[in-house]
Image: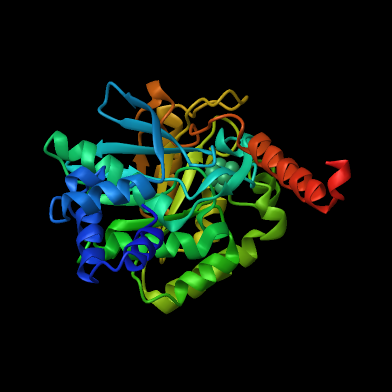
Amino acid sequence: MDLERVNALMEEWGEPGYRQRQVYEGVMKGLAGDYEQLTPLPAALRRRLADAEPLRQLETVESQRSDDGTIKLRFTTRDGFPVEAVAMSHRNRRTVCVSSQSGCPLACTFCATGSMGLGRNLAAGEIAEQVTVLAAMLREQGERVSNVVMMGMGEPFLNYDAVLAACRTLNDPAGFGLGARQIAISTAGWVPGIERLAAEPLQVKLALSLHAPNDRLRTELMPITRRFPLAKLIAACRGYRAATRRRIFVEYLMLDRINDSDRLADQLADLLGRDGFHVNLIAYNPTGSDYRASSSTRVAGFAAVLEGRGISASYRRSHGQDIDAACGQLAVKGASELRRKRARDRRRAAHAAALPAVHR
Ligand code: SF4
């Protein structure tokens, strides 16, 4: 929901201030999907709002359910950009993974989203709305969202302000009311974002997609390493740890014969040291690239080296692989093409406006 726009409309119409709170609570707490569900509002106001501004900013264009209970939703923004979000179940937790951008400019070589290019940054309302839409679906089956991770499409720290605003909205006890520690932001290693987050009062968790323990290999997998080499990245993580005392969750995708040897596990242990990090080893999901998943024996061997070096490590199986909802699989073609087309249209419109009337 574009709350600012809805509030501005109600102010313009002379509605009392408490109506704004009623709309906000109805959407964030009551998970209303349309104005008709906002029953504390008079029927005439509901109709007037519905005519002026759709309640939802995202249109759900596809919904898929995996054999393991994972739900994947595909949305489009009002200006046509694709967005995806996923709800996964793990033991008694229901984790919702949302996108912070349509597409992603960082081009990690193992990631389907990275091959799309960047469409555009999402607004805070568009990020939070992915959660409320999935929360409403889960509620129908008697479940609640227990965790939110900013780990879908995009690099969250390239859209820092909107991501943090969405986190605050989701955390607001008067609204969605999810504990800050139940929210995690996952970065590919955008150092200025880690530094900013270290100074935030909001106690959200930080996850780091690392995937390689040396600059040469990491640059191959994640070109962002050229800009922020590991020494700089790990220094920023240590600064974050010193400022917040919070542990950082390191995500490490297990790629067969690429980054899964005992020697690289040792290098990873050297890089991280004993304190402040927990390593999640993640099963790789096929995304049409040449990479393959490491065998379970290799994953166990890698984990054993880390544990032998005093580093806590766990292995995360993938969810929703059969519907392309697992890590690195979120991709809808065309985000960057759409961005280029929008830019072309804007240039043409500006050019046409600049022409004398006779040439138009
Ligand atoms: S892994 Fe994350 S940062 Fe890298 S391209 Fe994919 S979405 Fe972007």
Query: Considering only vertical position in the picture, is 222 above or below 59?
Result: below
* Res 237 visible: yes
* Res 178 visible: no
Residue in view at x 28 percent, y 40 percent = 134
Q: How is the image coloured?
A: rainbow
Q: In screen coordinates, is 204 left or right of 112?
A: left
Q: Quadrant of residue 17?
A: bottom left
Residue in view at x 46 percent, y 70 percent = 197
Residue in view at x 35 percent, y 34 percent = 317
- Residue 81: x and y in percent read 54, 39
Query: Considering only vertical position in the picture, is 163 above or below 252?
Result: below
The image quadrant in which ligand 1 is located = top right
- Residue 310: x and y in percent read 39, 58
Pick the front one: 87 or 50: 50
Query: Considering only vertical position in the picture, is 107 above or below 296?
Result: below
Q: Residue furthest front?
A: 358
Q: In screen coordinates, is 228 left or right of 360?
A: left
Query: Considering only vertical position in the picture, is 7 above or below 126?
Result: below
Q: Quadrant of residue 174?
A: bottom left
Q: In screen coordinates, is 277 left or right of 179?
A: right
Residue in view at x 55 percent, y 29 percent = 256
- How many numbered marks have been drawn onto this rendered protein structure? 0
- Residue 247: x and y in percent read 37, 64
Q: In screen coordinates, is 304 left or right of 157?
A: left
Query: In which quadrant is the C terminus drawn?
Result: top right
Pick the front one: 98 or 2: 2
- Residue 224: x and y in percent read 66, 52
Pick the front one: 16 or 112: 16
